[in-house]
Image: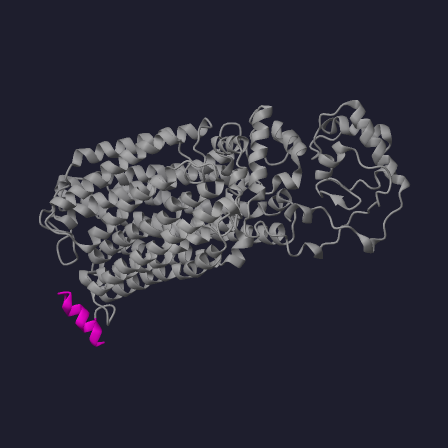
Amino acid sequence: MKFRSQRVAYWFFASALALLVLQIVYGFIMGFARVGLDGLHEWIPFNTARAVHTNLLVVWLLCGFMGSAYFIIPEEANRELAWPRLAYVQLISLLVVGVIAVGCYHFNIWEGRKFLEIPRPLDWLVVANVLLFIGNIGMTLWRGRQHTTTSMVLFMGLLFAALLYLPGMISVKNQTVDSFYRWWVVHLWVEGVWELIMGGILCYLLIKLTGVDREVVEKWLYLIVGLTFLSGILGTGHHYYYIGAPRYWLWVGGVFSALEPLAFLGMAMAALATARKGGRKHPNRIALTWSLGCAIMAFVGAGFLGMAHTLPQVNLYTHGTLVTAMHGHLAFWGAYAMIVLAMMAYSLPLMTGRRLWDTPMATWAFWTSNIGMVGMTGALAVAGITQVALERRLGLDFLVVQKEIEMHFVGLLLAAALFSTGIVMFIITFFRHGLPSDEALTPGVSGEPDEPLVAGL
Amino acid sequence: MGTCFYLAHASGLSYLPNQGIPMLSKSQARIFFLGGTGVFTAIFLALTWDSMRQIPKLTNDDKITPEVARGKELWEANNCMGCHTLFGEGAYYAPELTKVVERRGKPWIKLFIQDPQKMFPGERKMVKYNFDGRQIDDLIAFLEWCGEVDLQGFPPKPPLQNQLKPTATTSDLSGPPAPELFKTICQACHMVGGVGGVIGPALDEVHKRKSKEELLEWIADPQRLKPGSAMPQIDMTPEQREEIVTWLLGLSNTSPRPAGQLKPISQPEIYE
């Protein structure tokens, strides 16, 4: 760790993991409800559990992105964070808003639009919070002595994520118009600007971990984010097929969605190529494993599985079924959860001065969680495809079909247990690192492979 | 190739051979990113403008009455999308509701919302929201408006449905017409004359299995006679029960229709 203020990241990461645990708990509540064990229905009905599950995902990922930015930006800008104390205020206020929102869901208080469930007054607190964050990061860059491509892409991603939250706050009477602009937030986040954030973090990690020349990695970064926007912006059309928008979206959405995997493919190829060329000099192998794993799983989950059902002719039958949940799980895990975990695996030893990257538990955490998530995706895929065949193709009654696919949710729960085991091992490894320490400070050293990683090493 | 070199040098950055992607410099990659993003953002905004022009007609915007608007507010205030889908959007725990008014009819929906678990005893649960009569009307108005929106063919008619043969025997229904309550509520689950749901058994030949007294007792409180049955207790007056049972037993006088002339079961009406 080069600058003292980078340690803010630790607290963002620790909070992110706490929220992840809570997200998993609510996932289990839904899983059990689906196999008929819905004893919590009176207190936590399915719509509450689902909103908590998806909202916590967004909050912990944002928390992880913010932590990553607080770690990366000072180093890239080559100066301390502009206002370190403000970062703590911002973290606490983010958590408070999150807890209030989750509380509201348990008392049936909603804005109640898919993924944008948080009550409208709280929206303004989210905006204020994100402005604090953007201000802090932006001021650090502004005062900084260098402006790297990596830091600029990361900053632009975060800034546009904040701006794109605004169209989601519009209130209209027409359900179609409502949905149209809701996707500006949801789609243009996860298939647009979030990929900028992910690309920026991945780029940073590859530069640090492989030792490949910055110019080469950043050239890839431009190409990848270029492909992301080339396909992703008009790819929004795949959400406009069947909501009451004009018919040409079937063409526009279909063609550009088919191109969306290209960005992820480019990312996976770039990551693997740089890792091979760089010869993996860095001793933190587990961080590189998470980074490469992220690039590959993002391609499989977000790119390939996404494309598998964005073709309009296919989507006509899969739209609004569990096939979407199947794609959603592996996409968010691969593209966004794994990049945050990669960043944690990389930065923790640098913040705390403890090298736990070779422990068996760190390795097991990676494989167990990934195999578990692939298993969950498989269970949802079988359930989803069966639902499409029986309900959408044969026309059987909804509840009859749900009974028919109940067994696959037992499989889902088993895979989820494996996944959770992996996450628990990751968290144990996280806390075994201890707290950030001044002894880990290495002024003038950036942690790049050819330099000592920790003072005195 | 020459152009590549030219652009790379003109932008002041040197061309780096054998590093990553040949033929492309970092500044060209940046131009690709900024240019592509600019062009496709512009196209996207133009299409958005055109969509906003067309959507009022596609969605019958002029039919959004205060009731529909209030229904939408109610829909959101209770996060109905947390279980149901509408226009295929939402969660996948409860049925798609885009065409629900056409599929179930208003009387059934009204009865259902008042106490969802009563309608599907022992099945997957829905929260009992205690809406008042006006709120239920608003919600139905909203769902009815949703059902009329031009969704480009969604939800699709199940293409393989004609491959299924109804297993129920059928009556030709040449006798007196079914009571209104039977058509709006009972037929959601039971089939008669090849029309109706498939949750409960077909009732064409119920006269062979049950007496009038047995049927009256059963309908009055199914859970008492057979705990855990999927048959809900529907609030009816003794006269209404009498009317339905008498009509059902009257089906015995009609002759069965030859199998080749089956009317399609109710589902096509649902999806069309």
Asked if residue A305 lies left or right of residue A77, the reply is right
List x then y, in percent, for residue B247. 84, 34
Residue name at image x 33 percent, y 54 percent: B41
A159 lies above or below B36: above
List x then y, in percent, for residue A19. 35, 37
Query: Viewer-proximal residue, B248 or B143?
Result: B143
Give the magenta range. Answer: B1-18
| Residue that protrudes farthest toward the bottom in the picture | B2
Residue name at image x 14 percent, y 39 percent: A82
Asked if residue B259 lies left or right of residue A424, the reply is right
Q: Which image quarter: residue A127?
A: top left
List x then y, in percent, for residue A72. 20, 48
What's the image's color scheme?
one colour
Q: Which image quarter: residue B101?
A: top right
Question: For residue A289: magenta?
Answer: no
Residue name at image x 13 percent, y 46 percent: A2
A99 lies above or below A338: above
Query: Viewer-proximal residue, A237 or B54?
Result: B54
A334 lies above or below B183: below
Question: For residue B8: magenta?
Answer: yes
Give the mark count.
0
List x then y, in percent, for residue A292. 31, 58
Query: Viewer-proximal residue, A273 or B10?
Result: B10
Residue B98 visible in the picture:
no
Residue B259 visible in the picture:
yes
